Amino acid sequence: MLRDADAQFWNRAARKYAADPIADLAGYERTLARTRGLLRSSDIVMELGCGTGTTALKLAPFISRIVATDVSSEMIAVAREKALAQACPNAEFAVAPAGRAAGADSSCDAVLAFNLLHLVADRPAMLQDVHRLLKPDGLFIIKTPCLSEMNPLIRVAVPVMRLIGKAPFVAFFSAAELENEIAGAGFTIVERARHGSGRKDARIFIVARKQRAAAA
Ligand SMILES: C[S@@+](CC[C@H](N)C(=O)[O-])C[C@H]1O[C@@H](n2cnc3c(N)ncnc32)[C@H](O)[C@@H]1O
């Protein structure tokens, strides 16, 4: 379930998010390069929680089409401005919460979600929707911080910050717990790596393939 307060939090953050430099550039470049290596020029891709569209716009020249979505209308407004400025015709941006994408069943070769899963309250619904969107053998490519593996003080700090509107919803899980959830939703984990380059950054990168339905 998504609270209005969370969408508003991200709306307020959007212009600053767009202006700030990428916090972990080395980690970002690693994720971008690996993701690009997994995609083909014919691919139809959906990105969830795309923020201001940086990644979608960087990947668009190498694939057929990308539809990038985000719960925040302000993030999407910035992404559309950037797409216009960069004259990027095969990147489309839409406002949508993860778990309720407008795409047709089995329409995507890959679904991407970077730095998003820890912000989604109903991960089972999101995973079900990603499974629905993907073609058989399609790839779900994610990167996320695993807050259970980070400083335990975060568990104390987040509720306080939420009370004063300084933090959105965040979920606590370990990489192993997340992998189990993804596998349980009908995916095979085909690749795992750590893409956070900071010493305390437990950010995991996972590639999961949608399993084919068993023959009757
Ligand atoms: C930390 S930013 C990451 C943006 C981008 N993926 C990146 O890696 O730079 C998280 C993004 O997820 C969006 N978001 C948060 N909760 C969401 C939800 N439930 N569904 C869709 N997007 C969400 C926010 O609006 C924000 O743009």
Image: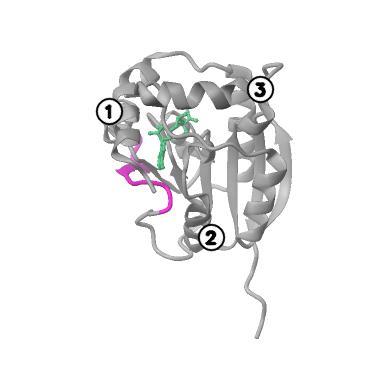
- Pointer 2 with pointer 3, Cβ within 8 A: no
Neighbour tally class for label 1: few under 14, some 14-19, many 20 plus, Cα within 10 Å:
few
Q: Which residue is mark 1?
A: 81
**Residue 12: image x %, image y %?**
29, 23
**Total marks placed:** 3
Residue 134 sits inside the magenta stretch: no
Report how far apart the C-alphas of labels 2 and 3 lie in the structure.
Answer: 28 Å
Dot 3 falls on a residue whose secondary structure is loop
- When asked about the image quadrant of residue 5, the answer is top left
Answer yes or no: is residue 66 visible: yes
Which residue shows up at 51% across the image and 52% down it?
A: 43
Dot 2 falls on a residue whose secondary structure is helix
Q: Which residue is mark 3?
A: 201
User: As rendered, which of 146 and 165 lies closer to the eye?
Assistant: 165
Which region of the structure is painted magenta? 88-99
Q: Which residue is mark 2?
A: 131
Which residue shows up at 35% across the image and 21% down it?
A: 164
The C terminus: image quadrant: bottom right
The disc, 3 or 1, on the residue closer to the chain's N-terminal end is: 1
Which numbered disc covers residue 113? none
The disc, 1 or 2, on the residue closer to the chain's N-terminal end is: 1
Q: Is residue 188 above or below residue 176?
A: below
Position of 182 with respect to 83 (left or right) is right
